Image (cartoon, coloured by chain):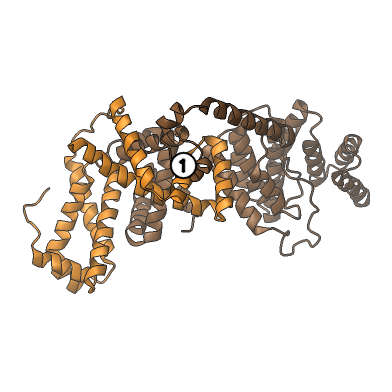
């Protein structure tokens, strides 16, 4: 499925221009599309989501100049249409699914905890408190705790969820970087 | 970010691979074009991962989760991270203390002198709070039911729902509907749904069923009461509320002239009888059975049942309604 064609600067410029005349906004849009495609492939259980995303982007980039003149809809949907074709091709050639990975060995867990420790300390105190409070307890105790936390902060439970999620994403990114560093050192 | 119950359910089904090809495409198109929706999907995904980590996904949901999430490096990382964060949070000192002093790691926490004393104190306080809740609120009571009671200033349905206090029926029939405190209703909805999701069981399903019954969403109410009954088949309160839901749905069918009202009344009677067999003292079931007989124009049985009700409860606002109903039966005759 993978194509030998590589993105030229000119083709990439054409793609960005098609996404938005403003270069900065085009860049943001491009990143957003890329992230969304990776997630869509991954949510379909595809272990090579980034590879398929790159293939999708390559195919669209190659045609960017033509598309810009003829396609009138939202560019995101064009990418999605191409992604569906790429996925269908992938499914036809898909290798057998891999067995489920073994759980982390103890030292892996320790590393995770060390990184979490470091990343927690980088958070501002309010965010740290919020995330720890949010993930403490289980079941009914947790629900009640979250409800109280939302009330203390004067926000709805849904806003609290979204806020906790944003902090969690930042933490996850930080822990990911930290684990990479500890592996390379 | 607007969290809609339907949207959340649809996204969970999407993430668990339960959508048809057409639905899948519709969701993915929205994910590609709507940033808010895409952000919302990330939150729902995060909650799903949490459910998996805490062992709340069962059967096909668990199998689908593992097939889709654990097959990808991104999914595995999400699971690993959620496990680590959960463990970390449970082993770290309370944030209230952390805010007053510099953050300490989970290891430092367990090696610090005096921690055992602090833990013992927390356990004692928690136990005290637990006993207080059980004594004064009952095991199934919580903020969700308090909010639900607060939401309805007038009784939304004629039947008596076990978790709702007495409220007068709206005085204007066919008007704009009963008076509702929307903020409390929303709060009740969020908490009760969250409970059913986080702590699925007879109590949480029963309470959510009551929320739907009060909201006149009889189909959902019946579904949740049935789910609760599967887990606790001999719970007279659930049986009473299921009987109430069939009674109300039967009345709705009669209004629509679907011809299915009688079937619903028969189901209602079956469940109310069973509730009263199991617990002859349950007032809600007796109240509802009297209402049901009256609805079915079985006047003699209705009058007897209201009188029986008054022998067990003669001085509550429910009793006043029983007396009024006896009068109404006399007038109809």
Q: Residue furthest left?
A: A4
- Quadrant in the picture for residue B291: top right
- Quadrant in the picture for residue A97: top left
Label 1 Cα neighbours within 10 Å, binned few <14 / some 14-19 / many ≥20: many
Decide: is B12 above or below A16: above
Q: Secondary structure at mark 1?
A: helix
- Quadrant in the picture for residue A155: bottom right
Residue A86 in the image, given as x and y percentages of width and height:
19, 51
Q: Residue furthest front?
A: B113
Q: Is residue B41 left or right of residue A50?
A: right
Q: Nearer the viewer, residue A108 or B222?
A: A108
Residue B169 in the image, given as x and y percentages of width and height:
79, 54
User: Across the whole image, how many numbered discs are drawn on residues?
Assistant: 1
Decide: is B193 above or below B2: above
Q: Nearer the viewer, residue A33 or A121?
A: A121
Which chain is indicated by disc 1?
A
Residue B168 in the image, given as x and y percentages of width and height:
81, 53
Q: Which residue is found at the position 36% from the left and 38% from the top?
A: A117
- Reading the image, the residue beneath label 1 is A132
Q: Nearer the viewer, residue B265 or A123?
A: A123
The picture's colour for chain B is brown
Q: Is residue A10 left or right of residue B3?
A: left
Residue A56 in the image, given as x and y percentages of width and height:
19, 55
Q: Which chain is orange?
A: A
Decide: is B155 above or below A77: above
Camera sees residue B53: no
Camera sees residue B322: yes
Q: Is residue B142 left or right of residue B168?
A: left
Q: Which residue is found at the position 8% from the left and 56% from the top?
A: A6
């Amino acid at each position: 499925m993978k194509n030998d064609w590589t993105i030229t600067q000119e083709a990439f410029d054409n793609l960005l221009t098609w996404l938005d005349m403003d270069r900065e906004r085009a860049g943001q849009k491009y990143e957003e599309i890329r992230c969304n495609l990776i997630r869509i492939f991954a949510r379909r259980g595809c272990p090579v989501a980034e590879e398929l995303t790159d293939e999708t982007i390559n195919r669209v980039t190659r045609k960017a100049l033509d598309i810009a003149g003829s396609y009138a809809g939202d560019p995101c949907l064009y990418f999605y249409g191409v992604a569906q074709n790429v996925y269908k091709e992938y499914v036809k050639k898909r290798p057998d699914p891999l067995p489920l990975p073994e759980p982390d060995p103890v030292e892996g867990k320790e590393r995770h905890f060390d990184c979490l420790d470091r990343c927690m300390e980088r958070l501002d105190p309010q965010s740290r408190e919020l995330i720890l409070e949010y993930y403490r307890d289980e079941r009914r105790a947790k629900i009640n705790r979250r409800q109280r936390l939302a009330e203390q902060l004067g926000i709805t439970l849904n806003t609290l969820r979204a806020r906790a999620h944003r902090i969690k994403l930042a933490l996850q990114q930080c822990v990911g970087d930290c684990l990479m560093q500890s592996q390379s050192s | 970010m607007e969290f809609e119950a339907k949207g959340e359910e649809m996204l969970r089904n999407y993430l668990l691979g339960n959508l048809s090809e057409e639905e899948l495409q519709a969701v993915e198109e929205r994910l590609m074009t709507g940033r808010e929706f895409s952000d919302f999907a990330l939150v729902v995904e995060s909650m799903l991962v949490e459910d998996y980590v805490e062992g709340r996904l069962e059967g096909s949901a668990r199998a689908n989760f593992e097939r889709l999430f654990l097959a990808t490096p991104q999914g595995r990382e999400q699971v690993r991270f959620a496990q680590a964060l959960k463990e970390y949070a449970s082993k770290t000192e309370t944030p209230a203390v952390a805010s007053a002093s510099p953050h300490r790691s989970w290891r430092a926490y367990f090696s610090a002198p005096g921690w055992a004393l602090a833990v013992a104190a927390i356990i004692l306080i928690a136990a005290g709070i637990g006993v207080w809740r059980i004594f004064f609120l009952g095991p199934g009571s919580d903020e969700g039911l308090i909010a639900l009671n607060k939401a309805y200033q007038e009784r939304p349905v004629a039947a008596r729902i076990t978790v709702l206090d007495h409220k007068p029926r709206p005085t204007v029939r066919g008007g704009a509907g009963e008076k509702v405190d929307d903020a409390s209703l929303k709060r009740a909805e969020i908490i009760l749904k969250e409970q059913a999701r986080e702590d699925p069981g007879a109590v949480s399903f029963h309470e959510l069923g009551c929320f739907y019954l009060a909201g006149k969403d009889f189909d959902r109410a019946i579904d949740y009461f049935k789910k609760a009954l599967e887990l606790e088949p001999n719970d007279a309160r659930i049986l009473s509320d299921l009987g109430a839901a069939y009674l109300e749905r039967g009345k709705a069918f009669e209004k629509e002239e679907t011809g299915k009202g009688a079937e619903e009344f028969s189901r209602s009677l079956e469940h109310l009888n069973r509730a009263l067999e199991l617990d002859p003292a349950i007032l809600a079931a007796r109240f509802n059975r009297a209402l049901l007989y009256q609805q079915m124009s079985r006047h003699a049985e209705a009058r007897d049942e209201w009188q029986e009700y008054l022998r067990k409860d003669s001085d509550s606002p429910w009793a006043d309604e029983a007396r009024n109903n006896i009068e109404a039966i006399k007038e109809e005759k």
